């Protein structure tokens, strides 16, 4: 459904730019709409239906009414439509990337990469759909037989952030649908278009009405409260800040809802003096500046052992200088705008606090001359653990370098955080690799790599970075209930 009041995007298939909600297999308009704007230039990309709590209830009812029928499909039948959905995502990858860059700002090649990353979860769980096995347990008495069934939990409510508007939904909806759950997705207000384009392709793939619903809304708190409180919703899956994760946990306690939480991070990135320094610099560039530093697994603290600190800082400065800040649609741009003014102000506050406490800027340090929410990729040296940048997630293009002396010291520093999502380190000493890998208090560890996100591995954190795992052979577990049947009287 095209919006007549804005400049159309350059799409091969304009029908992918959907602005209506998708509920119970129907495209739903609303009297009230909200504008989605391009963070690179403030231009309106589209006006999207703005759903409310009553609409949320209707979407939950649709998912609830659809769940029995969807669960009756065999795993193989569900696999077939998920595979078709994957194929359609790949066939339309360029248009989906254009829509994503327009609403979120990331450079088009990076947006294209996100679409393929999101699609990889749909491909993976299309395969897993056929392998939701139970167990047969040897009876504890001669006349007893025991079988274990794995059954879909039912209706799943999903709340996702703006930074990966396709992949964060795909990483949740794919396992949910694969095992026979139905799904109500509320995307971030800033980036609903990617989710709606996914729904267009889900419908084309043959995913039945009510199985997958997308409810764009400006009322995050109200929709969230309804998803958490409604007894027809069996589970909430959330990706976003720890602050909001705690709100949702409290709201889910009244109905003891199952929850999967992918929350905030404060990833340590450690460079030991035995590291391959060039590899460590490349790893730091990915771990820090991917998505303009707006990912939960971004390196937030970069610890460099004293013997290689100056060399590493010089090399990193040189690589950061080569980053090209600009509009995500422009050729050769590596770094788009930040999502909004609040995000820029947080980076500026972290820099100001660090400078006040003695740190130095060796690269960047201020807003870009491009204006708006463009910010210079920045490197700080002389950072210490007492600075705010060491304790709070920056969620922006700021690389703080912290000097350390020995292994025990840096592991203690790295673990001194309420977060535990990802951690990274570079070393070529196999003993150190095992010691540090085992001692880091995180859900995921990158060793001699700065990029750990893949559909084949279990993504998730410990401490206040969340609950549960997404992706991998473990990814279905959070959407399944285990039931056992004890069959007696068999003699
Ligand atoms: N662990 C992970 O994989 C990820 C973690 N994050 C973390 O999220 C933060 C940045 O992302 P950001 O989007 O700002 O995070 P937020 O937690 O602010 O928002 C995440 C989602 O929750 C919604 N939301 C906000 N308030 C409520 C509420 N009271 N009830 C229900 N839903 C609500 C938002 O809606 P709206 O945006 O419309 O207000 C958005 O859709 C960082 O801390 C980052 O680390 C982000 C991405 C991935
Ligand atoms: O939203 C996020 O930060 C994602 O989890 C990042 S990733 O999956 O692309 O690493």
Image: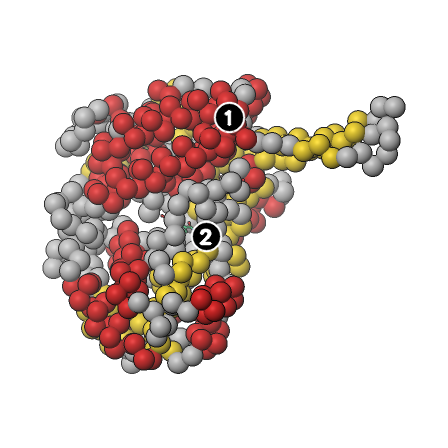
Tell me the SS state at disc 2: loop
Q: Residue at x 20, y 63 (%)?
A: 320
Indicate if the residue with disc 2 has its beta carbon within 8 Å of ligand 1.
yes
User: Which sits in the foreground, 192 or 266?
Assistant: 266
**Counting residues from the N terminus, which is met first, the one under dot 1 or under dot 2?**
1
Image location of residue 243, percent across then percent down: 46, 55
Question: Is residue 186 at least partly visible in the picture?
Answer: no
Image quarter hosting the N terminus = top left
**Circle 1 residues within 10 Å: few <14, some 14–19, many ≥20:** many
Question: Is residue 118 at least partly visible in the picture?
Answer: yes
Q: Which residue is mark 1?
A: 63
**Circle 2 residues within 10 Å: few <14, some 14–19, many ≥20:** many
Image quarter hosting the C terminus = top right
The quadrant holding residue 362 is bottom left
Q: Is residue 97 left or right of residue 270?
A: left
Q: Is residue 478 above or below residue 19?
A: below
Q: Residue at x 79, y 27 (%)?
A: 487
Q: Residue at x 20, y 59 (%)?
A: 375
Residue 263's disc is 2
Q: Is residue 262 above or below residue 275?
A: above
- Tag in front: 1 or 2: 2
Q: Is residue 252 above or below residue 405?
A: above
User: Which sits in the foreground, 234 or 322?
Assistant: 322
Q: Is residue 148 left or right of residue 366?
A: right
User: Which sits in the foreground, 353 or 150?
Assistant: 150
The quadrant holding residue 251 is top right
Q: Is residue 25 above or below residue 301?
A: above
Task: Say how the picture is coloured.
Answer: secondary structure
Q: Is residue 133 left or right of residue 111?
A: right
Tell me the SS state at disc 1: helix
């Amino acid at each position: 459904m095209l919006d007549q009041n804005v400049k159309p995007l350059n799409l091969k298939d304009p029908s992918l730019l959907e602005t209506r909600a998708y509920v119970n297999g129907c495209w739903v308009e609303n009297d009230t709409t909200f504008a989605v704007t391009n963070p690179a230039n403030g231009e309106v990309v589209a006006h999207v239906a703005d759903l409310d709590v009553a609409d949320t209830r209707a979407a939950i009812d649709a998912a609830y009414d659809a769940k029995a029928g969807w669960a009756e499909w065999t795993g193989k039948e569900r696999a077939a439509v998920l595979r078709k959905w994957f194929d359609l995502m790949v066939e339309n990858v360029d248009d989906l990337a254009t829509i994503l860059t327009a609403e979120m700002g990331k450079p088009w090649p990076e947006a294209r990469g996100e679409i393929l990353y999101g699609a990889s979860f749909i491909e993976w769980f299309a395969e897993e759909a056929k392998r939701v096995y139970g167990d047969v347990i040897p009876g504890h008495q001669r006349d007893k037989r025991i079988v274990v069934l794995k059954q879909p939990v039912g209706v799943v409510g999903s709340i996702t952030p703006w930074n990966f508007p396709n992949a964060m939904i795909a990483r949740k909806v794919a396992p949910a649908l694969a095992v026979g759950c139905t799904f109500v997705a509320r995307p971030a207000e800033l980036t609903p278009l990617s989710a709606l384009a996914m729904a267009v392709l889900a419908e084309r793939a043959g995913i039945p009405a009510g199985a997958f619903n997308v409810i764009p809304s400006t009322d995050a708190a109200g929709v969230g409260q309804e998803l958490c409180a409604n007894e027809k919703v069996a589970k909430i899956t959330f990706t976003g800040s720890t602050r909001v994760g705690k709100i949702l946990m409290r709201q889910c306690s009244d109905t003891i809802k199952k929850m999967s939480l992918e929350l905030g991070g404060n990833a340590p990135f450690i460079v030991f003096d035995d590291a391959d320094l060039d590899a460590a610099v490349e790893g730091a560039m990915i771990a820090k500046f991917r998505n303009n530093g707006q990912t939960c697994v971004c390196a937030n603290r970069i610890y460099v052992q004293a013997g290689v600190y100056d060399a590493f800082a010089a090399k990193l400065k040189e690589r950061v200088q080569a980053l090209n800040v600009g509009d995500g649609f422009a050729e050769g741009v590596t770094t788009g705008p930040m999502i909004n003014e609040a995000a820029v102000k947080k980076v500026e506050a972290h820099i100001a606090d660090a400078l006040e406490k003695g740190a130095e800027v060796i690269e960047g340090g201020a807003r870009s001359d491009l204006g708006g929410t463009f910010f210079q990729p920045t490197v700080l040296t002389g950072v210490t653990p007492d600075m705010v940048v060491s304790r709070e997630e920056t969620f922006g293009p700021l690389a703080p370098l912290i000097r350390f002396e020995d292994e025990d010291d840096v592991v203690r520093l790295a673990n001194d955080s309420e977060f535990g999502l990802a951690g990274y380190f570079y070393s070529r000493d196999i003993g150190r690799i095992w010691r540090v890998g085992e001692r880091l208090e995180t859900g995921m560890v990158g060793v001699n790599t700065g990029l750990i996100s893949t559909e084949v591995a279990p993504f998730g954190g410990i401490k206040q970075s969340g609950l549960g795992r997404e992706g991998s052979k473990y990814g279905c577990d959070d959407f399944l209930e285990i039931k056992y049947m004890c069959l007696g009287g068999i003699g």
